[in-house]
Image (cartoon, coloured by chain):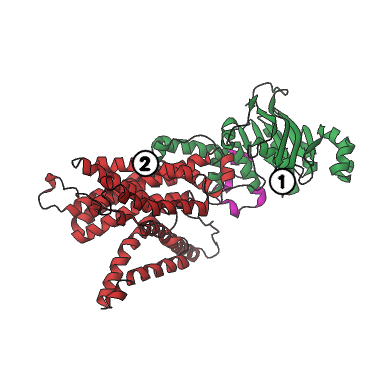
Amino acid sequence: MSTALRGSTLLRHGLFFLALALVLLLLTSFVFDAYTNYNVTEVAIYAISAAGLTVLTGINGQVSLGHGALMMIGAYTTSVLLTWHPDLPMILMLLVSIATTGIAGAIVGIAGARLRGPYLAGATLALAVALPQVPSHFASVFGGNQGLTVVSPAPPAFLGANFSPEQWLAWITLAAAVITFFVLANLVRGATGRRFRMVRDNEVAARLAGIDVARTQVLAYMISAACAGLAGSLFAYWVTLTSPSGFTLTLSLSLLTAVVIGGLGSLTGAVLGSFVLVYLPVKTGDLATTLNLPSNIANNVPTAIYGIVLIVAILVFPRGIAGGIASIVRGAGRIVRSSRSPAALPASPESPSQ
Amino acid sequence: MSGETPDTTAAVLEVAGIDVRFEGVVALDGVSLTVRANQIVGVIGPNGAGKTTLFNAVSRFVTPVTGTITFKGQSLLGLPTWRLAHMGIARTLQGLGLWPTLTVLENVVAGSPSRTRLAPDLLALPSADRHTASLREEALANLGALGVADRAGAYPGSLPHGVQKRVIIARALMARPSLLLLDEPASGLSATDVSELIDLLRSLRTRMAIALVEHHVDMVMAVSDTITVLNLGQVIASGSPAEIRANSDVANAYLGQTVAHA
């Protein structure tokens, strides 16, 4: 069994993500109330997008300040198609949104393959700023600044009349997240992930090793954008209103900070960062209310605390929360081992950015 | 690998009369170089002579304004760098170019230009695992042949220079090259390491053609079948080690007293 596990990535990752799916199914069904399910859905949506971004920025070394705009492409693909054909099934909407955003990502990636560092950041920033202007110029298609309404999917009849739509959407979103993370975990561990890192760390050596650097960068952008498209489509169903105000530059920057707080290049970090992104404003808002602060202060407390958390996280955990936890675990392991055999000091090499 | 009776006349690499200029500065001026199968060709010359530029022209990092570069009769001009590894041209870099975030084993596996198919990789299909396992096996064998298989799990940054030098050769061998370009393979090596390197190159010669750029003149003299001497972007001499040693131009331009006594 253990050799089968070691030999087969499919078995190892498959079992892990099946177990995760089961836990999430139980939690959303029996533990969480409707409000928690609603928030967990939001976390899962951000996590899908952040996971794509962490692969692009952390594993492949390409910065994107435009992932909010890519989510917007996914959300509008779903919303526009639903205004034309309201009966189209959700699974089809998700797949079409993945495809359109993946194609858009490939186009950004082709431009991106010629740009490096701050120039790439600038170009993607332009995307994040410009794209939300499009719906107001083509209001007949995109519904202008009012946006397009999306009907949240109704739970199938066999789940009973009392089954809440929040729980149904939570199930769908979490299932989408589990599948996304399964695929991305395979990618990060496999040959494709190795190529992404090779290009990130040394383009010259990567070329000499037979890697088409530009093609690899476009592929990374496409995969990353496809995740953003999936997240955007789910976002449309979750908000039930797709409008430009939902996809401001703030969204793009929030995704990037979530990835950095969580730990650049770490899929676990993308989840942790998304939790921070969703729950920190909620909790700090609660705190401000409990403290009875005047509203003009209370309204700004979440933003201020978010900024403080970002600064502290970067100072204390330069490799993000996931990296911080990993080094704490490693440190504890080292103490345990050295207390067992004080003579042997293990000189294990640091494993970076896994 | 190249056949039972090595045909020493077949040119694997043919560089003919190339000029390379950097914004008007002439880096290479009518340089020619022929590397035949099962031959070791040394390229020597003082700093700035154009040795690495010659390799960069072959590796398609720079494009000559005139002249031709052919590999097994096919022109390399117009091809992107990444295609060369797939054709069987491997090159090591002076600056090592190891990936610090990959283990030694992964670094060597990374030298394999074999294409990975995306779908099996994303879905973790057994074929992707088998592909990875076979590459790892080959990488371990290459590391073993260079005597550093025990370092497979280490990260390059923690290893002595001599070991890193072996790792980059092991990586280059993953391309199963018919032409191996080595950029200063002996730099920073101890005397023992250099003599082991000479033995290694002699054993590799039975399988491939080798060209090396090197400052370590004694090493080049010991291992090369023919030597080309560059000075200020021009070939000033070409021939067997004995001929180069006897060449007064070479002695004057570059080698000085060292070779006269060697």
Q: Is residue A60 visible?
A: yes
- Label 1 chain ID: B
> The chain coloured red carries which letter?
A
As drawn, the label of residue A210 is none
Q: What residue appears at the point 34 percent right and 40 percent down from the top-left corner?
A: A99
Dividing the picture into quadrants, the one containing residue A317 is: bottom left
Give the vertical position of B122 relative to A28 (above or below): above
Tag 2 secondary structure: helix
Q: Are there few (<14), some (14-19), or many (20+) residues within 10 Å of tag 1?
A: some
- Start-end of magenta stretch: B142-163
Q: What's the distance in space between the residues labelled 2 and 1, CA to CA?
A: 43 Å
Amino acid at dot 1: Asp
Q: Is residue A58 visible?
A: no
Tag 1 secondary structure: helix
Is residue A1 toward the left or the right of residue A201 in the image? left
Is residue B206 toward the left or the right of residue A168 in the image? right
Where does residue A332 sit, x and y in percent of width and height?
45, 64
Residue labelled with disc 2: A10
Quadrant holding the N terminus of chain A: top left
Is residue A289 toward the left or the right of residue B82 in the image? left
Of A123 and B136, nearer the camera is A123
Give the vertical position of A35 relative to B159 (above or below): below
Dots 2 and 1: beta carbons under 8 Å? no
Where does residue B95 sit, x and y in percent of width and height?
65, 48
Q: Are there few (<14), some (14-19), or many (20+) residues within 10 Å of tag 2?
A: many
Amino acid at dot 2: Leu
> The chain coloured green carries which letter?
B
Where does residue B181 sit, x and y in percent of width and height?
67, 37
State yes or no: residue B146 in magenta: yes
Residue labelled with disc 1: B193
- Label 2 chain ID: A
